[in-house]
Image (cartoon, grey):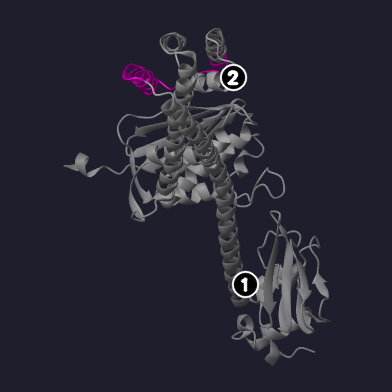
Amino acid sequence: MVSSLELRRIAAFSKLPDDQIHWFLSHAQEVAVQAGEAFVRQGDPADWMFIFLDGLFQWRGEFGGDTVSLPAQAGDVSGVFPFSRMKQFTVTGRAQTDGRLLKFPAALFPELIQKMPELTATLVAMMSDRIREGTRIEQQRDRLVSLGKLSAGLAHELNNPASAAKRATGQMRDALVRMRNANAALWRLRLDDSEKSRIEEAEATLLLSDMTPLEALALSDLEEGLDSILRSHGQDNPGDLSAALARCNMPPAALASLLTELGSATARDAIKRIAATAELAWHLNTIESCTSRISSLVQTVKEYTYMDQAPVQNVDVVRSLENTLGILAHKLKPKINVKRDYQAIPLLVNTVGTELSQVWTNIIENAIDAMPGQGELQVRTFREDHFVVVEISDNGPGIPPEIRPHIFDPFFTTKGVGEGTGLGLNTVQTIVRKHGGNVQVDSKPGDTRFQVWLPFAASPEAET
């Protein structure tokens, strides 16, 4: 039998009058549990409040595709509280050691509220703290999930140019060997000055020409034409030469002129050298393009995360939007078209840059998810009085009217298990409201529009 003295050792009951303690104990049930025993299971009706007297306990369950574990110990109060809307337990409660607990029926909460107002106020405060902590944990998890998605996309975006640069370096080694072999053969031929000059001229002309990659059909036609010219001048098996020269956009007339002016043996070794040199230049261009792409991606990430920048600053919303679109490029390609309509003058918002990035990321990701693989994403900015307005719209199926009132509710999601926490739009609304702004939504089939209104921050130049 639990005594009033034992119950008073629990902080929530320590200062309550004797009559309230006795009333509570007279309606509570004492339960002894063994290690490993469940005192309540996930899915059970939320009918009990628990007061842990002795032992160690654990709450455990599945949420958002993850397993959640929360410890409990003697002195803790848990379960359902007065004014809670919980209908079923979302986790299982299990004893980790032998222990004891009190169960108080939720059916008596109306009477408890009347007879024990101090305890009721304490329990409501505990419930508020529990909700805030649960929301904080889920928001952190939501950020980690988003970070994981962005990291996976960024890894994919970085892998493409990195792999291309790696392939190019390997092919450069092969081209360098061919160029050295061709040079050695030309030295053995003891060329006169005019022949050397002609080879160097053809080589220089090709290197200075436009090496923009041709479309597949045009490249094939050029390669076939160059191959035909080489064969007509007695060059056997010219496939590798014609392919290399075609990639570098060698004009057929220039090749024909060179073959006519040089002897057959000289021409073949000269063309091998020219082809190898041009191929080296081609691969250098590829590596330069790839490393520029990698550098651009790294810069985008730095700007998206506002690395090495002040926590609070005047942020250009267009630049912030463009950084977010750059980070999400892997999800936009290849069939989602982005249409931009930006106001020409800078629109500044005084904010934490990473929070603004989080707002755009959540809204744009939802828009992308609403368009299964293809569609049009529109991003528009303008100024309305003292507000910067960012409008993000998609031509997906729209938000059903029955769920529209709930889209900003915490933990509300229409996505499958493990695909979303239901905190994305709630986070958007929380951040925007913190900045003194608001979020407006208008949706119908084929046109869903989110408008984010944020206070305009004038630039120092505009204030002088």
Q: Is residue 30 above or below residue 91?
A: below
Q: Are marks 1 and 2 in contact (CB under 8 Å)?
A: no
Q: CA distance from mark 1 to mark 2?
A: 83 Å
Question: Is residue 382 part of the magenta span, yes or no?
Answer: no
Do we see residue 128 in this rendering? Answer: yes
Tag in front: 1 or 2 = 2
In depth, the one of 88 and 104 nearer the eye is 88
What residue lies at 36% left-to-right and 19% top-to-bottom? 205
Q: Is residue 431 above or below residue 258?
A: below
| Residue 318 percent location from the top left of the image | 38, 37
Q: Quick one: quadrant of the C terminus?
A: top left
Please identify the quarter of the rendering in which residue 107 is found: bottom right
The residue stretch that appears in magenta: 192-220
**Taking 390 as reference, is 349 left or right?**
left
**Lower position in the chain sequence, tag 1 or tag 2:** 1
**Taking 113 as reference, is 391 left or right?**
left
Identity of the residue furthest to the left in this view: 464
* Residue matched to label 2: 239
- Mark identifier at residue 320: none
Question: Is residue 206 part of the magenta span, yes or no?
Answer: yes
| Residue 293 percent location from the top left of the image | 45, 38
- Mark identifier at residue 123: 1
Q: Secondary structure at mark 1?
A: helix
